[in-house]
Image (cartoon, rainbow, N blue to C red):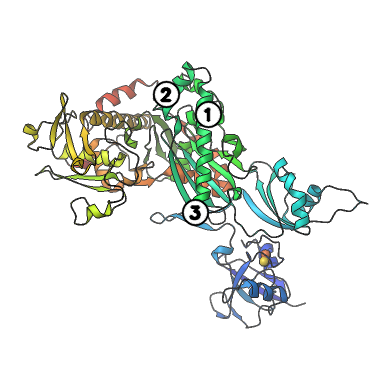
């Protein structure tokens, strides 16, 4: 038989094939990334391609109108039932009849690139651990007895190369009815281990299953738990939610929770039960929000600090409270999602917790590293993931160091007199006029500044409710710039500052940002206690960064990345005025948003990323802040605003 030249775009892969070869077959032989769930039976439509006709000088071919076969019955039936988009063909049905250029549209690529950050054009390559496969299974035969599962495994191996298949009991109980209802055709969700040739059956549906698979990316923080529900086909976030970590009632910060576990027999179990229950509720809420059956959530990736890690897994964190801070395990943890409280999703769903770097530097820091890739950086980058604990990474492609620093929850709006979580109603931006000392602010949920006409209407539903982490940072920095606060952090009196907004409060003063008491609302002020809490937090962050700089023997970093749930909102200028971060050109200070959450999402969508970060964490050098005397020195020196000893030439003051 004659053959024809086939060129696939965008990959550029080309080859010659006998006339009559289906496009999907040609694509598979050339290693072109063309999706298929039904194995070429014309059911799933995932194999859609767009053939090009006419002359392609770039490829040196002219494509005739009859380069692909006419529609066959399967394709026609599909078009009739579902409607194929103009110019589209089913790759498994259309056969090659002449030289042809075939484009694989993005949605037909399995390993599509998903842009996650427009500015940096960084992307995630889709390669989820759990995928759907449609198979036709041999019917049972009395004369050749074999189990339904064994014949399913045989079909999966023959058609999809899936070997070593395990089936948990929950799936096994669903298998026989599904096979019979589907007339020996089923769609299965299969999870793949990235270390060993091992597969696990996660679910089974009769016939061709139209639904999609979803996964959870969970950032389990000491103060808040944030989760994204992602579509495992395209990485899209279909719903997001956050809740307070219910363990707060056992202790505000990590060390108080570790001591709770030490002082109270069974205390660790109580905290484990609390967080697991919250995880289950959060997952159910996300599924309800996205209006999808929770059963279709088949995976969860969790990132967290070591204490949260141990408490989630039901491991007593007592060893993490004392030197040498030994982790029960530093490797990534594979398990069942149900074991860590995710009982509201698919009962066979898998969980994956990223590896920890060391006793104080957890899977959340590994996730930040996966997201920001300091180990690939050409210049020296300082990455600060700011939460109740700050995780700090410093390095470049030659070497990366990490530490954690106990900043306390002030940056998250906790322990602040009018503090609250970043939610509608919270003040998130503050400006204070240095001449009049009058403030203006922005509130989450409104695009207007408080002194702009129409502001009140935009916050009518929530009102102004409090101040969040980024708001308090800006407020304190602006108070310093406006001269309301001296370098030691002391708020001046009305006489000293010249504004009636500075009011006495006990033996100190407070600055009134907003007074809604006339309308029954709150009075939001920055108190001396608030400033002290922010000073402690920022000194801890700065001291951690300095310690890493000492270890690398550098005085200056090339760029700073601020991460954390509120990192997206911190203004670099205000962070530097406070002395939160070391001196650096302001335009080299960027925000990565919730980088730990992004890292979790990457690990959820891309199996190869899990292998990558498991390797990288071994190369990250850990610096222990708790036993390092210089940490204390840096901490004390960093207490002033911006700083007592280190120069900040980039601030120009
Ligand atoms: Fe499923 Fe073509 S591979 S329709």
How crowded pointer 1 is (Cα within 10 Å; few <14, some 14-19, many 20+) is rated as: many
| Mark pair 3, 2: CA separation | 35 Å
Which quadrant of the figure contains the C terminus? top left
Which quadrant of the figure contains the N terminus? bottom right
Q: Secondary structure at mark 1?
A: helix
Horizontal relation, residue 231 to residue 155: left or right: left
Residue identifier under label 3: 238
For marks 3 and 2 on the same chain, the one whose residue lies earlier in the sequence: 3
For residue 590, the mark is none
For residue 255, the mark is 2
Residue identifier under label 1: 272
Residue 371 appears in view = no
**Between residues 641 and 613, which one lies in front from this camera angle?**
641
Foreground disc of the pair 3, 2:
3
How crowded pointer 2 is (Cα within 10 Å; few <14, some 14-19, many 20+) is rated as: some
Indicate the position of residue 38 as horizontal and vertical percent values.
69, 61
Indicate the position of residue 42 as horizontal and vertical percent values.
69, 68
| Mark pair 2, 1: CA separation | 16 Å
| Mark pair 3, 1: CA separation | 28 Å
- Quadrant in the picture for residue 15: bottom right
Q: Secondary structure at mark 3?
A: strand
């Amino acid at each position: 038989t004659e053959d024809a030249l086939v060129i696939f775009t965008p990959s550029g892969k080309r080859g010659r094939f006998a006339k009559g070869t289906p496009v999907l077959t040609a694509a598979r032989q050339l290693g072109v990334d063309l999706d298929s769930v039904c194995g070429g039976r014309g059911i799933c439509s995932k194999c859609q391609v767009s053939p090009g006709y006419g002359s392609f000088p770039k490829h040196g071919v002219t494509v005739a109108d009859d380069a692909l076969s006419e529609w066959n019955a399967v394709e026609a039936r599909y078009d009739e039932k579902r409607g194929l988009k103009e110019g589209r063909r089913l790759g498994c049905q259309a056969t090659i009849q002449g030289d042809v250029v075939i484009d694989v549209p993005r949605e037909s690529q399995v390993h599509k690139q998903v842009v996650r950050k427009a500015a940096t054009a960084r992307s995630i390559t889709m390669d989820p651990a759990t995928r759907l496969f449609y198979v036709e299974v041999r019917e049972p035969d009395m004369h050749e007895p074999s189990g339904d599962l064994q014949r399913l495994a045989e079909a999966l191996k023959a058609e999809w190369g899936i070997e070593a298949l395990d089936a948990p009991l929950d799936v096994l109980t669903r298998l026989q009815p599904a096979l019979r209802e589907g007339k020996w055709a089923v769609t299965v969700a299969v999870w793949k281990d990235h270390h060993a040739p091992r597969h696990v059956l996660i679910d089974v549906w009769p016939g061709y299953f139209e639904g999609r698979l979803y996964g959870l990316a969970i950032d389990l923080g000491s103060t808040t738990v944030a989760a994204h529900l992602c579509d495992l086909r395209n990485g899209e976030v279909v719903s997001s939610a956050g809740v307070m970590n219910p363990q707060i009632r056992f202790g505000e910060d990590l060390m108080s929770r570790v001591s709770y576990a030490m002082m109270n027999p069974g205390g660790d179990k109580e905290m484990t039960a609390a967080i697991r229950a919250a995880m289950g509720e959060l997952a159910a809420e996300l599924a309800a929000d996205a209006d999808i059956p929770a059963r279709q959530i088949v995976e969860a990736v969790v990132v967290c600090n070591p204490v949260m890690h141990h408490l989630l897994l039901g491991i007593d964190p007592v060893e993490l409270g004392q030197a040498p801070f030994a982790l029960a395990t530093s490797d990534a943890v594979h398990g069942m999602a149900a074991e860590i409280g995710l009982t509201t999703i698919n009962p066979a769903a898998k969980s994956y917790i990223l590896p920890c770097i060391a006793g104080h530097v957890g899977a959340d820091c590994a996730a930040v590293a996966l997201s920001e890739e300091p180990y690939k950086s050409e210049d020296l980058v300082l990455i600060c993931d700011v939460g109740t604990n700050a995780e700090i990474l410093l390095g470049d492609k030659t070497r990366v160091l990490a530490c954690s620093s106990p900043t306390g929850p002030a940056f998250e709006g906790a322990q602040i007199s009018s503090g609250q979580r970043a939610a509608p109603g919270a003040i998130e931006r503050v400006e204070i006029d240095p001449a009049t000392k009058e403030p203006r602010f922005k509130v989450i949920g409104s695009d207007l500044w408080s002194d702009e006409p129409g502001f009140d209407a935009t916050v009518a539903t929530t009102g102004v409710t409090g101040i969040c982490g980024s708001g308090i940072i800006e407020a304190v920095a602006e108070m310093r710039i406006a001269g309301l606060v001296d370098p030691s952090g002391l708020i001046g009196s009305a006489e000293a500052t010249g504004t009636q907004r500075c009011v006495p409060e006990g033996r100190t003063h407070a600055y009134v940002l907003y007074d809604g008491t006339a309308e029954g609302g709150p009075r939001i002020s920055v108190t001396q206690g608030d400033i002290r809490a922010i000073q402690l937090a920022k000194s801890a962050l700065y001291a951690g960064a300095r310690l890493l700089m000492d270890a690398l023997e550098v005085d200056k970093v090339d760029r700073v990345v601020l991460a954390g749930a509120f990192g997206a909102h911190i203004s670099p200028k205000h962070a530097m005025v406070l002395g939160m971060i070391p001196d650096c050109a302001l335009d080299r200070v960027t925000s990565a948003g919730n980088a730990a959450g992004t890292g979790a999402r990457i690990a959820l969508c891309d199996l190869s990323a899990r292998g990558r970060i498991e390797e990288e964490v071994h190369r990250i050098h850990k610096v222990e802040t708790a036993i390092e005397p210089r940490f204390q020195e840096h901490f004390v020196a960093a207490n002033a605003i911006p700083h007592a000893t280190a120069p900040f030439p980039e601030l120009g003051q």
